[in-house]
Amino acid sequence: MDPTGGDVEYEPVSVKAVLAEMKDTAELLIDLSFSAVLHGSDDVAREVLDLEARMDVLQLQARMSLLMAARSPEDAEQLAPVLGVVGAAEKISDAAGDIAKVILEDIGLPDAMRAALPEAVETLVRAELAADSPLAGRTLADLNLETDTGVRVIAIRRGSDWITNPDRDTRLEAGDTTLLRGVEEGVADVYERATGHAYEPPDPVEPDIEDLERAVDSIVLMKNMSELGVDLAYGSVLFDSEDVAEEVVELEAEVDALQSRFEAWTLRAAARVEDPVSLRGLVHLANATEVISDAAVEISEGVLRGLGTHPVVEQAVRESDEVIVRRTVVPGSEFDGVTLGDRQVKTETGMRVIAVRRPEDGERSERESRRTGSDGEWIIQPGPTTELRGGDVFLAKGTRSGAKRLAELTGGDSDGWDDSDE
């Protein structure tokens, strides 16, 4: 089947496997599309469109199989939330494609977007393995890149096939196109070993219009909240948790509020820039990001409406390569009053802390207040300087082995998001 075009005919496929691949692909597309914008990378943007075409095929396969499975009104009721998950993943894919086209079609984007890069995402680059690369022919476990350099290989394109979320047994081959994510210093090292060429980071830019900087900050925060919303939505489906699904709805409402602020700041900035048309790209980004946030709610809609989680969706999310766990910081424990950097959670476990939820009466630093929105409830994508406090709940994403290691470090009972609680 050609993912770039042509006819798609029905063939027996595992709906579970297709849904798992759609989940992994949707999450990867969010990463890639924003990285393409923030790095101004046409190469990464083209990879987004290639994956978007693959997603189109996957969603058609899933819909055909689900239609074949519905034989009664009861079947239709049970399968309706599954169709919602399929449709939501497709919406995320389309939104990512729209974001990539901002770069490929030169729609117009202010330099201030690159000024947001350090706080928005880790460095992500596309690197093609040279024939004489010392990485070729070795497994990721053998290379131990994440421990040694802080860099993860988040996906590999081999010819027309994609390996999303490669694991420790994945072997790199000459000619592979790898997507590397991590701190810039580590990325530069791995990129040079992969390609034989030095990595050239984008030049930093200082924004000169305050309202424009605020508009860009709003988009970055919208991106972070939307991405977290997708993670939480899949978590709500996996554990059939209405409480977690409600958090997705709250995040979507915050994204809507941020979009309103973004529109106001962009209109004010338009009066001060030389060419207001150059801000079109920002509007495209905000609209696409809001679509991703809405899609997250659609993923969890079956849980919100009390329809429960269909077993095929639960198994698909379970068999996805990354899991989400939730841990509560016990007051007086060794995690109370230390920063994520102090504990080196990512280095020790391979788990990435994607958010910290702090009680409403908790104190916040000025930096955290700026990143969390109006109510201060969530600290989105916390960094090494983020302090954990007793009563905080933090969400971490990574491999199952990393989740077990994190449980050993934190001690006590998990707060309901890993397999031990089922």
Image: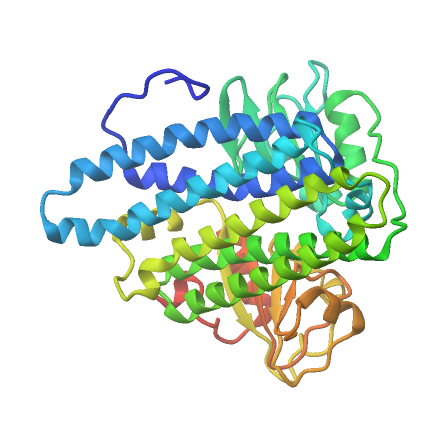
Left or right for 256, reference 235 = right
Which one is in front, 386 or 93? 93
Q: How is the image coloured?
A: rainbow
Residue at screen point 72% across, 23% down: 134
Quadrant occupied by the N terminus:
top left
Residue pushed farthest left? 72
Left or right for 197, reference 292 = right
Left or right for 57, reference 326 = left
Numbered marks: total: 0
Question: Can you tell which quarter of the image residue 328 is in?
Answer: bottom right
- Is there any visible trace of residue 45 in the rendered image? yes
Rendered position, 266 above or below 177: below
| Residue 124: percent from left, percent from top | 70, 38
Left or right for 192, reference 230 = right
- Is there any visible trace of residue 145 in the rendered image? no
| Residue 113: percent from left, percent from top | 77, 44
Rendered position, 180 above or below 221: above
Rendered position, 84 above or below 108: below
Which one is in front, 412 or 3? 3
Which one is in front, 128 or 261? 261
Quadrant occupied by the C terminus:
bottom left
Question: Can you tell which quarter of the image residue 277 is in?
Answer: top right
| Residue 178: percent from left, percent from top | 63, 28
Residue at screen point 63% across, 16% down: 175
| Residue 287: percent from left, percent from top | 58, 47
